[in-house]
Image (tube, rainbow, N blue to C red):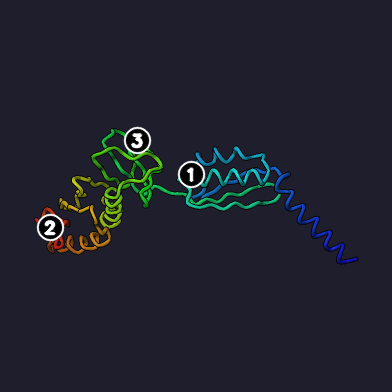
Amino acid sequence: MKKIIYLSILLVLVLSLFLSQFFIRVRISCGTQYGECPREITDTLIMTNGKSIFQAKREIKKTLSSNFLTTKYTVQFKLPNTLKVDLSVRKPNLALKGNTPDSVALVDREGMVLAINKSTILPTVTIQSELPKVGEKVGSTSLTALTLIEGLNKMYQITTGVVQNDTLLVDLPAQVRVIFPLVDADSELLLGSLRLIYSSVQDAENKTLYNEIDMRYKNPVLR
């Protein structure tokens, strides 16, 4: 008899949990690793407020799976009626400027364009072509140039560079121009080599002995 009672209670609990997916109306709470969710995501998610857990989860999955800003997400039900959405989102670290005035593409480290702004304080590479659209990835040479600028920014606080004929042109302190190759280039190797070379082209009084470092060759050329 007790066994039957226990089984009945268990069955009721299981049915309650299952049916709650369809009867509990939820509200959405959204956050990211940086704080609040981006508005473009929040505006979509709040449309699921007031829907059942089952419906809300299905629509959240559809929304976030197709959103390029999101890299991964989790959804948790919190009593009494909250669906907590935690997102890992892309963040712009670099910028790309094209031949369109007052337009700058904000880009993450993987080369994904996240937004188009009029200006930015991020390290920026200028290219001689149109900018990719939001949600698209930059080309391989542009991505290499951006990776180099990020490294140069960390080493020498350089904030700008120009792509020209498959090379990146950068002006270092003390008026030293550096020419980087962008095709089949190893960014880490180039930056490591530059660090050694740049320190060696200055004398004890920190005066520059050369005006140009050409990194396109196996043995960099100093001019």
The reply to whether callout 3 and callout 1 are in contact (CB within 8 Å) is no
Residue tagged by mark 1? Answer: 67
Which quadrant: the C terminus? bottom left
Does the residue at mark 3 contact the one at mark 2 (Cβ under 8 Å)?
Answer: no
Give the label, 1 or 2, closer to the camera.
1
Q: Quadrant of residue 27?
A: top right
Label ID, residue 207: 2
* Label 2 crowd bin: few (<14), some (14–19), many (20+), radius 10 Å: few
Q: Quadrant of the N terminus?
A: bottom right
Q: Residues within 10 Å of mark 1 (few under 14, many from 20)?
A: some
Amino acid on which disc 1 is placed: Asn
Q: Looking at the picture, tell me which residue is in the foreground, 55 or 42.
A: 55
**Residue labelled with disc 3:** 118
Residue 169: percent from left, percent from top: 19, 48
The amino acid type, in three-letter code, at marker 3 is Lys
177 left or right of 79 in image: left
